[in-house]
């Protein structure tokens, strides 16, 4: 899952990254910093896995007031 | 860019996520937590953009001893 600060929400980590990169001489536009969470779940279908992961994001992994999340599924053999 | 703890490197954030999800009743395998950094760069080609982003990862955004990084490019119109 990718969890990112929503647009318009202050992102101090992103601002620090921008500043540091510019000090190192890189020309960059806006930077935003979020989290990537790699997780193994066991589910009978991709749809069921997605439903589980959505609930985990809503309940724990993302703060829906200030963060958005994106789920990317990768299938593994059993 | 996606920056993740390398395999075998201790990941306390991932362990906390695993524990918390299990306490909430989710059955999950290993969890690993890293960072996603979204960044705008201006480059004449995708190859040049990738080279710039690799240098940023090596110089600042990832700690190559304990973290690996992955670059995903998305083209924008000028």
Image: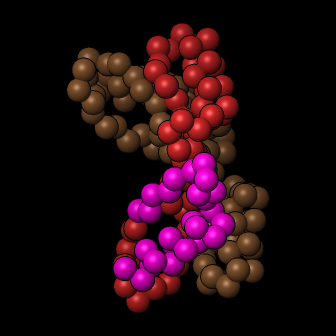
Chain colours: A brown, B red
Image mark count: 0
Q: Is residue B64 magenta?
A: yes
Residue furthest bottom as drawn: B44
Residue in front for this viewpoint, B8 or A14:
B8
Judge whether B72 appears above or below A30 on screen.
Answer: above
* Rendered location of residue A51, percent (x, y): 39, 25
Judge whether A23 appears above or below B12 on screen.
Answer: below
* Side (left or right) of B3 relative to A15: left
* Rendered location of residue A61, percent (x, y): 59, 32
Q: Residue at x 54, y 10 (%)?
A: B25
The quarter in which the C terminus of chain B is drawn is: bottom left
* Rendered location of residue A6, percent (x, y): 61, 52
**Quadrant in which residue A24 is drawn:** bottom right
| Residue A51 seen by the camera | no
Residue in front for this viewpoint, B67 or A56:
B67
**Quadrant in which residue A78 is drawn:** top left
Q: Which residues are magenta?
A: B47-72
Judge whether B30 appears above or below B69 on screen.
Answer: above
| Residue B65 seen by the camera | yes
* Side (left or right) of A48 relative to B56: left
Q: Residue at x 37, y 85 (%)?
A: B45
* Rendered location of residue A10, percent (x, y): 73, 57
Q: Is residue B67 magenta?
A: yes
Q: Residue at x 49, y 25 (%)?
A: B30
Q: Residue at x 45, y 57 (%)?
A: B70
* Side (left or right) of B71 relative to B6: left
**Quadrant in which residue A17 is drawn:** bottom right
């Amino acid at each position: 899952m990718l969890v990112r600060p929503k647009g318009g929400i202050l992102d101090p980590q992103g601002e620090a990254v921008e500043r540091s990169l510019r000090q190192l001489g890189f020309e960059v536009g806006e930077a935003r910093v979020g989290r990537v969470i790699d997780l193994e779940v066991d589910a009978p279908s991709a749809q069921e896995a997605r439903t589980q992961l959505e609930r985990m994001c809503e309940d724990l992994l993302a703060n829906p007031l200030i963060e958005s999340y994106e789920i990317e599924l990768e299938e593994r053999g059993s």
